[in-house]
C-alpha cells in the first residue's frame, strides 16, 4: 500500500491467472479478486492465459508478459498478483520485465493472515509461515551484498549478507517453533480439562465470509468481528452455548476455508485446521 498524509492508498492491482486445466481458473480468479480487496489492494483488471503448463522462466508466455507490461504502463498499475504460487526466479523475471512489484497467491494470503492475527498463537504461526516461505526466496543478490573488511579474517568476499539473512531467519524459525510447542502444551491442557469435565465441543465450519462469525454472535453474543471480507477473523473464538434441551456445549468459531490454500506451510503450523480442510471438498 501507499501512504499519503497518513492515509492508506490501496495499490492499483492487476490480477493474472494461468489456466492449465487443473482447477476452475475463472472461479479461482474471482476469489483472488475478493482476497486482493480483503488484503487492502485495489483490483483494476484481470488477465488469463491458457497453457498446458507454466512457463519455467515467467509462468506465462512471453507474449502475455509483454501484454502485462503494456497494460501496467498504460494503467498506472503498482502491483501484480498471480493466482498461483511462483518460484523466486519467476518473480524476479516478471518484475524485471514489467518494472512492477509481483506477488503470488500464497504471499497475498500470508499478508492477509498477518493483518488479521490477534492472538499470540496466531501471530507466531503466521510469522513462522512467512519466514518459511521467504527463506528459499532469498536468492539472486550475488556478491554485491558481500561484506568486505580490512582486518584479519575479513579479507576477501567473506560472508555474504544473503547467508547472514538466511541464518537469522533459520534461528528465528527455530525460536518460533519452540514458542509453538509451548502454546500446543497449553492447548492440550485446555483440551484435557474439557474432556475431564465432559464438555462437548461444537465447531462452526465453512468457507471464509460465509457468516460463521455472524452466527456465533447471534447464538452467544460473543462480539466477534463480523465484516463482509475474506478472513475478517483469523483467531478461533470459543463461547459456552446453552442448547434448548438444557445441555451446555462449547461453540468454536473457526478460521474460514478457502480454495487452494497452500498446505505445504499451513500443515506445519496449524495441523488440526489443515486436516479439517483436507477432509472438505469444494
Image (spheres, rainbow, N blue to C red):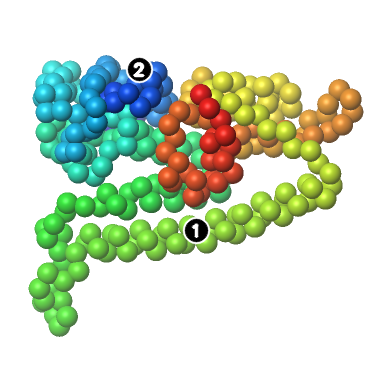
Q: Determine whether, in the image, residue 162 is placed left or right of residue 281.
A: left
User: Of helix, strand and loop, which one carries label 1?
Assistant: helix
What is the crowding at mark 2: few (fewer than 14 residues within 10 Å), some, or many (at least 20)?
Answer: few
- Say above or below: 94 vs 43: below
User: Of helix, strand and loop, which one carries label 2?
Assistant: helix
Q: Is residue 56 or residue 29 the one in the foreground?
A: 56
The spot of residue 83 in percent (x, y) is: 32, 28
- Residue that label 1 marks: 177
Give the numbered dot on residue 26: 2
The spot of residue 120 in percent (x, y) is: 55, 49
Please identify, in this view, whether the residue under mark 2 or under mark 1 is nearer the observer: 2
Residue name at image x 37 percent, y 61 percent = 170
Q: Is residue 100 or residue 268 the one in the foreground?
A: 268
Q: Is residue 13 visible?
A: no
Q: Are marks 2 and 1 in contact (CB under 8 Å)?
A: no
Q: Determine whether, in the image, residue 251 is placed left or right of residue 41.
A: right
What is the crowding at mark 1: few (fewer than 14 residues within 10 Å), some, or many (at least 20)?
Answer: some
The spot of residue 44 in percent (x, y) is: 28, 17
- Say above or below: 225 vs 169: above
**In the rendered image, which quarter is residue 61 located in?**
top left
How many marks do you count on the picture? Answer: 2
Q: CA distance from mark 2 to mark 1?
A: 37 Å
Residue name at image x 16 percent, y 38 percent = 57
Residue name at image x 13 percent, y 18 percent = 74
Q: Determine whether, in the image, residue 10 is placed left or right of residue 182.
A: left
Residue name at image x 46 percent, y 37 percent = 113
The spot of residue 56 in percent (x, y) is: 19, 38
Give the numbered dot on residue 203: none
Q: In the orientation shown, which residue stands out farthest toward the right?
A: 246
Q: Is residue 144 visible?
A: yes
Question: Upstream in the sequence, badge 2 or badge 1?
Answer: 2
Tell me the quarter of the image containing the N terminus: top left
Amino acid at each position: 500500500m501507499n501512504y499519503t498524509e497518513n492515509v492508506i492508498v490501496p495499490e492499483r492491482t492487476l490480477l493474472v491467472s494461468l489456466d492449465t486445466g487443473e482447477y476452475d481458473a475463472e472461479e479461482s480468479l474471482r476469489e483472488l479478486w475478493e482476497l486482493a480487496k480483503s488484503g487492502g489492494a485495489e483490483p483494476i483488471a484481470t488477465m488469463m492465459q491458457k497453457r498446458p503448463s507454466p512457463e519455467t522462466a515467467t509462468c506465462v508466455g512471453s507474449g502475455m508478459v509483454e501484454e502485462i507490461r503494456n497494460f501496467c504502463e498504460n494503467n498506472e498499475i503498482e502491483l501484480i498478483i498471480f493466482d498461483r504460487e511462483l518460484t523466486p526466479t519467476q518473480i524476479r523475471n516478471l518484475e524485471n520485465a514489467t518494472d512492477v512489484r509481483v506477488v503470488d497467491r500464497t504471499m497475498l494470503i500470508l499478508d492477509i493472515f498477518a493483518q488479521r492475527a490477534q492472538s499470540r498463537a496466531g501471530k507466531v504461526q503466521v510469522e513462522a509461515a512467512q519466514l518459511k516461505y521467504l527463506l528459499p526466496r532469498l536468492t539472486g543478490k550475488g556478491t554485491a551484498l558481500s561484506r568486505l573488511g580490512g582486518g584479519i579474517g575479513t579479507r576477501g568476499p567473506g560472508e555474504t549478507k544473503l547467508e547472514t539473512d538466511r541464518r537469522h531467519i533459520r534461528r528465528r524459525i527455530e525460536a518460533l517453533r519452540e514458542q509453538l510447542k509451548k502454546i500446543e502444551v497449553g492447548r492440550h491442557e485446555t483440551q484435557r480439562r474439557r474432556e475431564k469435565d465432559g464438555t462437548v465441543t461444537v465447531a462452526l465450519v465453512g468457507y471464509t465470509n460465509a457468516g460463521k462469525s455472524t452466527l456465533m454472535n447471534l447464538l452467544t453474543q460473543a462480539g466477534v468481528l463480523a465484516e463482509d471480507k475474506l478472513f475478517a477473523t483469523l483467531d478461533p473464538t470459543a463461547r459456552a452455548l446453552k442448547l434448548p434441551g438444557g445441555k451446555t456445549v462449547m461453540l468454536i468459531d473457526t478460521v474460514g476455508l478457502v480454495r487452494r490454500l497452500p498446505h505445504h506451510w499451513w500443515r506445519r503450523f496449524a495441523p488440526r485446521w489443515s486436516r479439517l480442510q483436507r477432509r472438505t471438498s469444494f
